[in-house]
Amino acid sequence: MLALVTGASSGFGYHICKKLINQGYNVIGIARRTEKLETIKHELGTNFLPITLDISESYEKTLDKLLSLPTKFSLKEIDIVVNNAGLALGLEPAYKADIHDWYQMLDTNIKGLISITRIVLPYMEEKRDGIIINMGSIAGSYAYPGANVYGATKAFVEQFSLNLRADLAGKGVRVSNIEPGLCGNTEFSLVRFRGDLTQVKKLYDRTNPILPEDIANVVLWIASQPKHININRIELMPTSQSFNHLQVTHN
Ligand code: NDP
Ligand code: 8X3
């Protein structure tokens, strides 16, 4: 059994790789930071293949890298792809946001995700088997101030997941979108707040958030469903997170 996980160097991705390996999978783990990946390889052993790759780079570069994997990790053997790599940059309102942050979110959360998907799909279609698990977010379904482009990228992921299902009808290939709310113990908020630990601590203070292990369990649960079941989407929040009213301004 072979899985490919993007964003393997921290947070959800690391825990997903670890749990998949414990279940007997060989895992290709992709991220930009070689050192982090090497430390994980040291822990997880020879069934983990670390690949240093920036998925936001060109399709051709990603393809080149993935076509030259050792036989044990060959793309034609892939059973599960977890398109998990992604990021939010900033929480400023749209009129103050940095356009380059917006482009980086688009290039990673959308362009990177579709490149990986486009590369693996023909192999899955040919063997009439496989699961694509995308990492969406509640930010793809609910608007909140400062989510602007980040939320929009996750809305793309949600709709792309459903549209893939439509294209894959009758092909035996499954597609799921996981849409988590607030999760802690990852680098997500540290990245979003550009290393400002005070802001990170304030956000998570007494929230008892979802943990990366919880997300890895969801991935394993999806993967353990019988072949005639496709989990379209799963939305999960910590109990401490809920809904607020729509805003009205009085000018
Ligand atoms: P982390 O920041 O801990 O992990 C993100 C991972 O993505 C890292 O391994 C990072 O590795 C990798 N990554 C980022 N950019 C690239 C790139 N261009 N190419 C390859 N790898 C990349 O965050 P989380 O684990 O929390 O987030 C994982 C996913 O879950 C994201 O898609 C996020 O949007 C989503 N999510 C997170 C939530 C949360 O509250 N934490 C809630 C809902 C969804 P490296 O820097 O080494 O490249
Ligand atoms: C991350 C969850 O609530 O910060 O996708 O948008 S949230």
Image: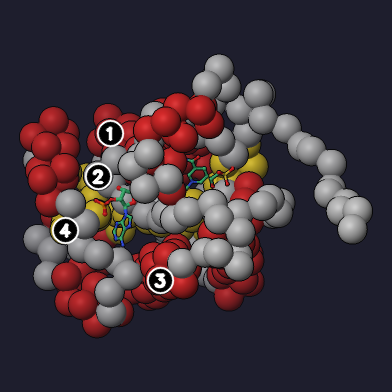
- For marks 3 and 1 on the same chain, the one whose residue lies earlier in the sequence: 1
The number of numbered discs placed on residues in the rendered structure image is 4
| Residue ID for mark 1 | 18
Which quadrant holds the C terminus? Answer: bottom right
Which of the two labelled residues, at mark 3 and mark 4, occupies the earlier sequence position? 4
Q: Is residue 143 left or right of residue 112?
A: right
Question: Mark 2: is the Cβ under 8 angstroms from ligand 1?
Answer: yes
Kind of residue indicated by mark 4? Thr
**Residues marked 3 and 4 touching at CB (< 8 Å):** no
Above-or-below relation of 110 to 22: below
Expressed as whole percent of the image width and height from the top left, the position of residue 115 reads 37, 73
Mark 4, secondary structure of its residue: strand
Residue under circle 3? 100
Numbered disc in front, either 2 or 1 = 2
Disc 2 residue crowd, few under 14, some 14–19, many 20+, Cα 10 Å: many
Residue 24 visible within the image:
no
Q: Of the two numbered discs 2 and 4 on the same chain, state the one appearing first in sequence.
A: 2
Image-quadrant location for residue 147:
bottom right
Spatial separation of the CA atoms under disc 2 and disc 1? 11 Å
Disc 2 is placed on an element classified as loop
Which mark is drawn over residue 170?
none
| Residue corresponding to mark 4 | 52
Residue assigned mark 2: 9
